Image (cartoon, rainbow, N blue to C red):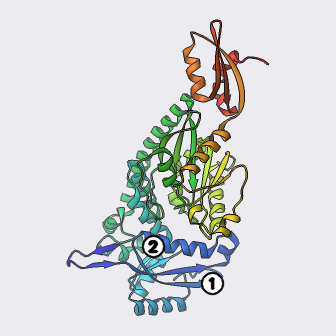
Amino acid sequence: MAITTHDTETEIQDRAILVSLVTDKIKRTGVDPELSLQELVQLAETAGVIVLDVLRQNKETPDSKWFIGKGKVEELRMAADGLGANTAIFDQELSGAQVRNLEEALDLKIIDRTQLILDIFAGRAKTREGIIQVELAQLSYLLPRLSGHGKNLSRLGGGIGTRGPGESKLETDRRHIRDRISELKRQLDEVVKTRELHRERRRKSGAVQVALVGYTNAGKSTLLKQLTDADVYIENQLFATLDPTSRVLQLPAGKEVVLTDTVGFIQNLPHDLVASFRATLEEVNEANLVLHVVDASSPMREEQMEVVQSILQDLGAAGKPQIVLFNKSDICRPEQLQMLPSGPGFLKISAFNPDDLTRITEMIADELAGDTLTFRIPGDRGDLSSLLYRVGEVLEQNVEDNDVLYQVRLNKEDYGKWSYKLAEYVEQE
């Protein structure tokens, strides 16, 4: 990511040393420090940063002044001088005071993991909702740290940590930021109400919803595009797509479902970001079925799956029916494929294989299918006939006198929504 100064034409790229501190608290939480550090490398590269080196330290507790130990600060300073680094990126959140102290000691731009992720999100947000959510998360993160980011925010240009609202914060006091946060929350409330109206409309129409979830860069957007011809941005980067996209997917028997791509998950997703994007993430709660897309080629596959399940648990969606799609099987080694679970609820697929796409739609149809019922619908009730085709899979229909007999397969949830209209027309065996 190039930083262009205002007084010269020189472009200076962020050249960073990454820093990871492993404390006793982190060990107790079960967070994998190496997975987190590997992700930090990917995040930095996604932001256009040249990663020069990685420093690790094990310590019982963070240093209140420097975060890392004083000796490690000196080691970082010497490494930065020797490698020509202009930035240090920490894998954990820093306080404003720690940022200020490190900047003064190192004469480097200091960025933490949360700020880096927020910066990437700022570059990815395209819709009004996404832009509001990112700015709200950035300001919520910045407010308690305002006094500690003076030198960082005064740097000219648009490098990591200064994108979005960051560049003008020297002239902005806390009261102004609080006012802006209040205004953004008001705007977001309006967007959330609109989203809820859309959800309610989908509920009333009987639309069946399927949500794509998974670790960032697992291939969700590619799968959405291949299944529905959706016009979505696809790139081999973390958080390549940010705004949720919904498209109609036609199943083998002709039934249509709404397939929604959600923002990718990641270990240690910033709290402010989760809070700001909660309305978007809660699309998962409206789903009849969850497709958990997994990068089968990743050496950290198991850990990534655990992170996704943990976030689904936090969202209250862990109990949803789920199909696990082990994607990228075309680039897996044979021993990787052999280690993958198989059987009901699991598929090994490549998003680029047409046969695999067919298998996915067939499994979705089977998962959504439920009991087979026979309905006797009066010939003049075309509205009910249309409803049966919309919410179920019509297996057979026959005309008998002035009625039409429909044999329909539909799941309990769908029937539960529409039983008040359909129950009286069910033929008893």
Query: Which mark is drawn over residue 44?
Result: 2
- Which residue type does callout 1 highlight? Asn
Q: In this view, does 30 lie to the left or right of 358?
A: right
The local crowd at label 2, few if under 14, some if 14 to 19, many if 20 or more residues have their Cα within 10 Å, is: many
Q: Is residue 62 left or right of residue 159?
A: right
Q: Residue furthest right?
A: 429
Q: Quadrant of residue 77?
A: bottom left
Q: Is residue 249 left or right of residue 314?
A: left
Query: What is the quadrant of the N terminus in the image?
Result: bottom left
Q: In which quarter of the image is residue 321?
A: top right
Rendered location of residue 282, percent (x, y): 56, 47
Rendered location of residue 4, percent (x, y): 27, 74
- Which residue type does callout 2 highlight? Ala
> Is 229 situated above or below 150?
above
> Is 68 situated above or below 192?
below
Residue at 58% in and 72% down: 36
Query: Which mark is drawn over residue 417?
Result: none
Rendered location of residue 212, percent (x, y): 56, 50
Query: Which mark is drawn over residue 58?
Result: 1
